[in-house]
Amino acid sequence: MELPLGFEFEESVFAPSRERVASCSGSYAARRCEPGWFCEEMNSEDDVEVLTVKKFRGDLAYRQQEYQAALCEYSGCLLLLPSSNVAMGRDVKESQARCLAHLGRHNEALEIAAKLRNGATNTDHLTTVLNLQFAIYRSLECLEEMVTCLQQLICLHPFNPWDWKLLAETYMSLSQSRSPSLGSDIKLRQCRGLTTNHTCKASPGLFGRETESPQEKHSWREDFYSQHSSKTNDIWAISDSISTTEKSERQNKVIHAAFGDWRLGALKDVCIHACASFVRARLLLQLTQSQQSSFALESNLKTQQEIEDKVKGFGLKEEALLLITEAMGEDLLPEKLKEDIQGEVKCVGTSALTSLVTVSAADFEDKWFQKLKVPWACG
């Protein structure tokens, strides 16, 4: 009889099930690897095993700070790696760049980082590249470039307390370096030269966006020197007939007169940014400590105490600190934090990744520190 709705059962539903013959699987013997097994001589023809051995050897050499040996292993690994293995290829290239940075070959390290950045297709790729660039610039002590990398990382991960803490510490280092001197200017020009060669020179720039040319790029130092060129020229106009000691004293007086007012304004902004970043990091650590235990909680509390001590060093009045805390914590909603902790990886094209990163430092500072541009009140 036909079913009311016109459905029919297949005959196979009522057919007897096939008998399954139990087969005895072969015994499985797990491979036991002794510590350092990859350091021994190997005559394997398995490409995967050869790649694994070279990668492990490189990692061990890097950990032992034998960067030249590590670089050789990574380079050999990359030669054998098929182009289809994109993930391992990016990992090995990053390792190469870190070795080159330790060896003082920063130009080559930045070239690799630029290629990795241009090939990024998801937020994990971008995060890794920015961390790599930060490490390279830190070894060069290029503070402005370090700040830029951290600002871009925070655009991707605004609820990462460690990035905020690093940003605060870099701001503090930047404030300490903002006393213009011949040595600091030479260091700046060296950093600029490397940056120009590997970021400004490339026409696409950051993920396809055109960057400023070296002639268009300005900094706080260049603006300052243009404003005070007549005063600084007075330093070198002191007669050579004056004794070295007397000349040095006069130069110091001219420098103090020329730079005094500027330092107050420039340092105020940088100190505000540093303090606010520390406060933001502390707020994020406080929000996550309830989910932590053991060594993670211990590290969290220790870091909070370190931040507390540094914030006290700014000598803020209580109302000023409350203002900063309120401004830096207004977006800390539970649902936003939950989304960030889950760590969703966005797989998009390079053009779409551009929109996730704030290119301009001014845009970043307007977003996070605009509400703090009030008279600086210290106790």
Image (cartoon, helix red, strand yellow):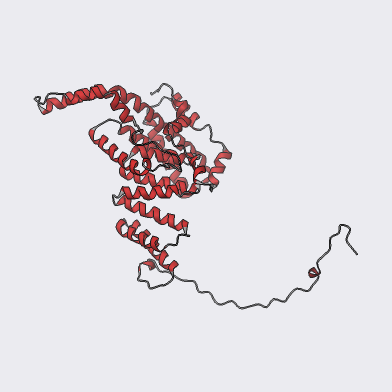
- From what the image shows, is residue 72 above or below residue 254? below
Query: Residue 359 falls in which quadrant of the image?
Result: top left
- From what the image shows, is residue 293 above or below residue 167? below
Residue at left offset 28%, top offset 37%: 189
Query: Residue 239 falls in which quadrant of the image?
Result: top left
Horizontal and vertical percent for residue 122? 50, 48
In which quadrant is the C terminus drawn?
top left
Q: Residue furthest front?
A: 203
Give left or right: position of 16 versus 372.
right
Give left or right: position of 310 versus 189.
right
Residue at left offset 38%, top offset 68%: 37
- From what the image shows, is residue 298 above or below residue 324? below
Residue at left offset 40%, top offset 69%: 34
Near-viewer residue (28 or 56): 56
Q: Residue furthest right?
A: 1
Do we see residue 157 in this rendering? no
Horizontal and vertical percent for residue 280? 46, 35
Near-viewer residue (359 or 142): 359
